[in-house]
Image: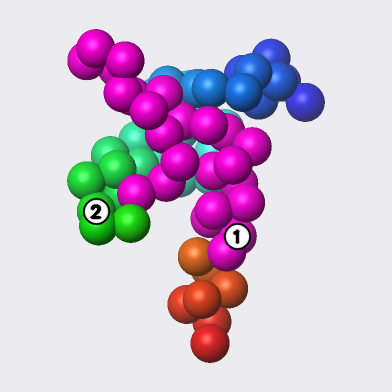
Amino acid sequence: MSEATEKTFLTVRETAATGILSEYALRLMLKSKNPPPSIRIGNKTMINYPLFLEWIDEESRKAAI
């Protein structure tokens, strides 16, 4: 596991660097009605990476139904 994925909160850019989704796709999701688990600190959005993985798994299961 890389250093970036060992941290609980990652920036949008760090999350995109994991290879799951592009930075553009993540930013679109953050603006949606059902955004991934995240918090804003000033101008920076921090994504709770472990919860994000669970969230994206749950969302993909919903889409498969």
Q: Residue at x 29, y 43 (%)?
A: 30
Please state the horizontal and vertical placement of residue 57, each as a whole percent of the image: 60, 60
Can the viewer see residue 12? no
Please state the horizontal and vertical placement of residue 43, each as a whole percent of the image: 22, 15
10 Å neighbourhood of mark 1: few (<14), some, or many (≥20)?
few
Residue bearing mark 1: 57
Q: Residue at x 31, y 23 (%)?
A: 40
Residue 32 vertical placement versus 43 (above, below): below
Residue 45 vertical placement versus 58 (above, below): above
Please state the horizontal and vertical placement of residue 61, each as a whole percent of the image: 58, 73
Q: Quadrant of residue 21?
A: top left
Q: Residue at x 62, y 51 (%)?
A: 54
Q: Nearer the viewer, residue 34 or 63?
A: 34
Q: Quadrant of the N terminus?
A: top right
Classify residue 41 as left or right of residue 16: left
Q: Nearer the viewer, residue 43 or 2?
A: 43
Tell me the kind of residue under disc 2.
Ser
Residue bearing mark 2: 32
Q: Which mark is residue 20?
A: none
Magenta residues (range):
35-58
Q: What residue occupies the far bottom of the structure in this picture?
A: 65
Secondary structure state at the residue bearing disc 1: helix
For the residues marked 2 and 1, what is the alpha-carbon distance in whole angstroms?
17 Å
Secondary structure state at the residue bearing disc 2: loop
10 Å neighbourhood of mark 2: few (<14), some, or many (≥20)?
few
Tell me the kind of residue under disc 1.
Asp
First of labels 2, 1 by sequence position: 2
Q: Is residue 42 magenta?
A: yes
Classify residue 57 as left or right of residue 22: right
Q: Nearer the viewer, residue 16 or 34?
A: 34
Q: Is residue 23 magenta?
A: no
Residue 34 vertical placement versus 49 (above, below): below
